[in-house]
């Protein structure tokens, strides 16, 4: 019997056992197994590290030729890459960021290598949302946050989903690492809120910080009705926006992985957002669900606007996720959506790929796994899809800052 089965067997569960006891036992067993898996994947201290990039990958991220990187290395300029036994150069994410700083000094125009905010630009807060499971919301959020960080943006990723998948992807296991709090709830609760800086964590990726999530976030959903009944909530939908104001000068972009429901957390995230991404899996049941989601969202935003909130956003876009180009019914739905929403649907879809799902088995994104772990065509196809999608969002950010024609 495997370890998991043995642990359940030791519990001696019976048919007459209370369901709450069964659920609690299963939760404890699963949490222990996930913790053991993390420890085995990321020894010795169970922490993650970003992989090294080949010289070709580093050059692609920087937008230069590999030969130019080689010349910089030979001239002794910039960080020293790792040399393999075959004399191949490997660059860490920190190396790539240091090269960005170096290259920006001699760039033809500002922002060629450090594309973040300049004086007068406002911080972009992007809410990624849908209330149907399986729409690719967390996958979209995590890959977008990591892509922007690797491109040189200063990024804060916020997990506002109590299920905390975004958190787990970034090496934090909620059951073990957040037993004393440490989520955004600490900064937006009604009694004695903590400074948002106290819940921000550095990640293993340069330029990417994290506010993790766990079940504690549900407390905000429970506290808000009580606070409203006691006239203590004030403008509750400004809680996230007001908390983020304290770190406005620290980040270029904030990515919020929203909860899969239209509750108080989502409303507060919508009020803070400057841009909105709605994920759509192009299947009929998902599209029908999205119709209800949009109607409910519009109604709730009307209520918030009537209460004095400015609900205007710089942009809103739909993201096609888990798309299979060879699937005829999906293609019909995609054509249907593009006919209705035109440019509001991003041109680049996120393709359904075993590379993305297999990476998730080890709590990694595609940007973190080695290309050698997959067949070259599978990896390249998935990576091309992700880069095209995330680049399109980056262009929206640049356009918001008035730099679309640079």
Image (cartoon, helix red, strand yellow):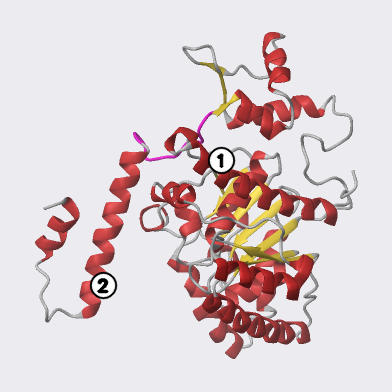
Q: Within the image, what quadrant is residue 42 found in?
A: top left
Q: Nearer the viewer, mark 1 or mark 2?
A: 1
Residue 28 at x, y = what percent?
26, 62
Vertical order, 67 against 130 (above or below):
above
Residue 309 forms part of the magenta stretch: no
Q: Is residue 171 visible?
A: no
Q: Residue furthest bottom?
A: 229
Q: Within the image, what quadrant is residue 334 found in?
A: bottom right
Residue 118 at x, y = what percent?
85, 45
Task: Classify the position of the C terminus by image quarter.
Answer: top right
Residue 159 at x, y = what percent?
54, 60
Q: Looking at the rendered structure, which numbered label has been put on residue 23? A: 2
69 or 260, nearer to the observer: 69
Q: Is residue 394 visible?
A: yes
Residue 46 forms part of the magenta stretch: yes
Residue at horizontal 68 percent and vertical 9 percent from the top: 74
Q: Is residue 336 left or right of residue 288?
A: right
Q: Residues within 10 Å of mark 2 (few under 14, many from 20)?
A: few
The local secondary structure at tag 1 comes to helix
Range shown magenta = 43-52
Please name the residue that numbered disc 1 is placed on: 380
The mark nearer the N terminus, 1 or 2, is 2
Q: Is residue 249 left or right of residue 262?
A: right
The local secondary structure at tag 2 comes to helix
Residue 265 at x, y = what percent?
58, 73
Vertical order, 31 against 53 (above or below):
below
Residue at horizontal 68 percent and vertical 80 percent from the top: 234
30 or 147, nearer to the observer: 147
Q: Residue furthest top?
A: 75
The residues bearing labels 1 and 2 have C-alpha atoms spaced at a distance of 41 Å
């Amino acid at each position: 019997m495997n370890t998991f089965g043995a642990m359940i067997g030791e519990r001696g569960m019976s048919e007459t056992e209370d369901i709450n006891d069964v659920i609690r036992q299963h939760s404890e067993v699963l949490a222990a197994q996930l913790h053991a898996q993390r420890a085995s994947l990321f020894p010795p201290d169970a922490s993650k590290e970003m992989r090294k990039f080949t010289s070709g990958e580093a050059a692609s991220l920087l937008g230069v030729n590999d030969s130019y990187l080689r010349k910089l290395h030979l001239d002794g300029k910039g960080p020293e890459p790792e040399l393999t036994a075959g004399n191949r150069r490997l660059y860490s994410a920190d190396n790539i960021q240091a090269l960005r700083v170096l290259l920006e000094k001699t760039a033809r125009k500002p922002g060629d290598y450090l594309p973040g905010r300049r004086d007068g630009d406002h911080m972009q807060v992007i809410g990624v949302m849908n209330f149907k499971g399986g729409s690719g919301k967390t996958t979209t959020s995590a890959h977008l946050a990591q892509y922007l960080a690797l491109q040189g943006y200063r990024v804060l990723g916020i997990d506002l989903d109590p299920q905390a998948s975004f958190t787990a992807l970034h090496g934090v296991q909620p059951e073990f690492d957040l037993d004393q709090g440490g989520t955004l709830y600490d900064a937006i609760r009604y009694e004695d809120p903590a400074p948002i800086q106290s819940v921000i964590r550095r990640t293993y990726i340069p330029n990417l910080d994290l506010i993790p999530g766990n079940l504690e976030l549900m407390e905000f959903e429970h506290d808000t009705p009580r606070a409203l009944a006691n006239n203590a909530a004030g403008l509750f939908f400004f809680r996230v926006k007001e908390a983020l104001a304290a770190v406005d000068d620290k980040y270029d972009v904030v990515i919020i992985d929203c909860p899969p429901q239209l509750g108080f957390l989502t409303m507060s995230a919508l009020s803070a957002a400057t841009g909105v991404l709605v994920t759509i899996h192009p299947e009929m049941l998902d599209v029908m669900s999205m119709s209800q989601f949009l109607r409910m969202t519009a109604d709730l935003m009307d209520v918030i606007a009537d209460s004095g909130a400015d609900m205007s956003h710089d942009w809103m876009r739909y993201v096609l996720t888990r798309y299979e180009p060879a699937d005829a019914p999906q293609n019909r739905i995609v054509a249907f959506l593009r006919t209705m929403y035109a440019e509001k649907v991003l041109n680049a879809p996120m393709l359904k790929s075993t590379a993305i799902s297999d990476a998730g088995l080890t709590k990694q994104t595609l940007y973190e796994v080695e290309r050698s772990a997959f067949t070259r065509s599978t990896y390249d196809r998935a990576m091309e899809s992700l880069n095209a999608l995330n680049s399109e969002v980056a262009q929206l950010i640049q356009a918001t800052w008035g730099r679309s024609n640079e």
